[in-house]
Image (spheres, rainbow, N blue to C red):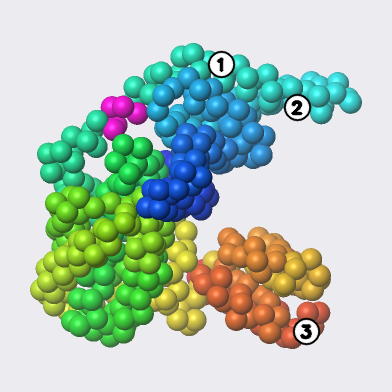
């Protein structure tokens, strides 16, 4: 396993503790901003309890659940309350450590006693194991781990303050901008900058750290350069991609444009650094995390009076990246259709799975049926027609010798899911395409005898034979 993949996986685990709880971070940021702006005592009353208790406990639950499902989430929350009580600083780092760690300890305990519990005592053992182990870790956290993690948090906070006070924060672009196309953006943004930025809010009321990764300026600059100086599909795709990037906040959309001409990392770094320099010079910040990194989210979370200054920083980052990208794009020939599709494929390989937005750069004819191993059958509720249709299609796959193909049924509201093909009723096709953008979608009218079943199976078999 390469270092890049290891870092990706570690970063994914960090961000997976924060991303599911971003709504709570946003709620806290909005309550803080409004409460301070209108000087309302009731709204101000939300600030400290949510910051010190709700947010760390949510992170701990997500981390524990990631390791050992719901039981892991429960013990992670119990254990983390100990470091919260035993420390005077907000325990985001403590939650990220104790949530997964306590869940792992419980998981090892369950493995140790597996098969050794007398019949009828399973429930009492399962409940008391969570309670006793969780309580022990909570006490240890309160007495010993809390102060230690508080010191570690202080070191990180001091490091951030040093960068800010010495105007070195723009140098973080050297790490952040190249990390984005390698799909470390969530790890950096939600796994590192969001917790550290939230700590700054206690003393400053806002944080520039929320703007470092979410700044859409550098990516927009690259897309604008392709819009005016690109060729073929790179030029035509850049128009729609820029809208998705700026207003939708999906920064993945510009990654293929960089990957097909990697030297564009340099304009991104310079543009990102200049944007951050403007942010620090004008002393701006957000009152909460802006996720996704949409200009809409950024404006909503901007500290009162900072909106125009933040827009100026984004504009500077965009303009500088745009200007520096032009000669590099011209030198590379503007990027042809094959280059963009190849870059989209490279993006999928870097991410380790098919990106939800890579379909923007691919046509249906490019779909590789030889790689189909999971087929989702979707309907409105996920239990009626889809269950019936999935059974029929699964039997046909088995009869055709496609034993490695799994067909499962699912409700549309639970999409997207891990699959290469989605089958659905004709009237539901638009809904499915809207949420499962990375899959090949098939519409049927007859759940039992749809001719599309045999056509799909034949395409898979033919594609596999051609690969041999």
Look at the image and tell me whether residue 160 can be seen.
yes
Location of mark 3 (residue): 446
Left or right of 160? Residue 97 is right
Residue position marked by numbered label 2 in the rendering: 126
Image coordinates of residue 316 in percent, x first then y, are: 16, 65
Q: Residue 3's x, y, as percent?
A: 33, 42
How far, Cα to Cα, is label 3 from label 1?
60 Å
Instruction: Say which label, 3 or 1, has the lower sequence index.
Output: 1
Q: Which residue is mark 1?
A: 139
Vertical comparison of 217 with 106: above or below = below
Say which of marks 3 and 2 sits in front. Answer: 2
Looking at the rendering, the stretch of residues picked out in magenta corresponds to 153-157
Q: Nearer the viewer, residue 401 or 138?
A: 138
Q: Nearer the viewer, residue 401 or 255?
A: 255
Label 2 near label 3: C-beta < 8 Å? no
Residue 314, placed above or below residue 13: below
Of tags 3 and 1, the one toward the viewer is 1
447 or 51, which is in the foreground? 51
> Which percent across, then down, holds residue 253?
36, 68
Q: Residue furthest right?
A: 120
On screen, residue 123 versus residue 260, left or right, reads right
């Amino acid at each position: 396993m390469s270092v890049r993949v290891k870092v990706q996986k570690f970063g994914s685990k960090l961000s997976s503790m924060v991303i599911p709880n971003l709504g709570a971070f946003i709620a806290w940021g909005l309550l803080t901003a409004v409460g301070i702006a209108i000087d309302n005592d009731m709204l101000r009353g939300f600030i400290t309890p949510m910051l010190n208790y709700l947010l760390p406990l949510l992170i701990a639950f997500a981390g524990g659940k990631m390791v050992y499902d719901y039981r892991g989430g429960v013990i992670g929350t119990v254990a983390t309350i100990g470091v919260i009580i035993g420390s005077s600083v907000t325990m985001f780092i403590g939650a990220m450590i104790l949530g997964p760690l306590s869940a792992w300890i419980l998981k090892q305990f369950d493995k140790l006693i597996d098969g050794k519990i007398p019949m009828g005592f399973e429930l009492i053992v399962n409940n008391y194991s969570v309670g006793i182990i969780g309580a022990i870790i909570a006490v240890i956290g309160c007495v010993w781990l809390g102060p230690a993690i508080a010191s570690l948090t202080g070191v990180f906070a001091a490091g951030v303050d040093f960068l800010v006070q010495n105007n070195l924060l723009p140098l973080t672009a050297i790490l952040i901008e190249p990390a984005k196309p390698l799909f470390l953006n969530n790890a950096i943004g939600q796994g590192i900058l969001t917790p550290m930025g939230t700590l700054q809010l206690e003393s400053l009321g806002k944080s520039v750290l929320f703007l470092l990764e979410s700044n859409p300026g550098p990516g927009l600059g690259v897309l604008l350069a392709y819009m005016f100086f690109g060729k073929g599909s790179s030029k035509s795709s850049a128009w729609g991609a820029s809208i998705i990037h700026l207003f939708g906040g999906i920064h993945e959309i510009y990654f293929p444009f960089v990957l097909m001409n990697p030297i564009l990392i340099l304009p991104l770094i310079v543009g990102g650094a200049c944007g951050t320099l403007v942010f620090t010079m004008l002393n701006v910040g957000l009152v909460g995390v802006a996720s996704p990194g949409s200009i809409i989210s950024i404006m909503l979370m901007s500290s009162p009076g900072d909106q125009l200054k933040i827009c100026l920083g984004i504009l500077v980052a965009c303009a500088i990246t745009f200007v520096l990208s032009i000669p590099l794009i011209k030198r590379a020939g503007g990027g042809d259709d094959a280059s963009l599709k190849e870059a989209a494929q490279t993006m999928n390989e870097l991410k380790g799975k098919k990106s939800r937005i890579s379909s923007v750069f691919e046509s249906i004819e490019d779909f590789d049926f030889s790689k189909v191993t999971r087929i989702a059958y979707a309907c409105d509720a996920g239990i009626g027609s889809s269950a019936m249709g999935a059974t029929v299609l699964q039997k046909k796959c088995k009869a055709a010798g496609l034993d490695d193909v799994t067909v499962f049924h699912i409700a549309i509201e639970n999409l997207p899911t891990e699959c290469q093909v989605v089958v659905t009723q004709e009237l539901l096709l638009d809904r499915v395409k809207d949420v499962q953008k990375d899959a090949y979608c098939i519409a049927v009218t007859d759940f039992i005898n749809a001719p599309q079943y045999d056509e799909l199976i034949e395409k898979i078999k033919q594609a596999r034979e051609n690969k041999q």
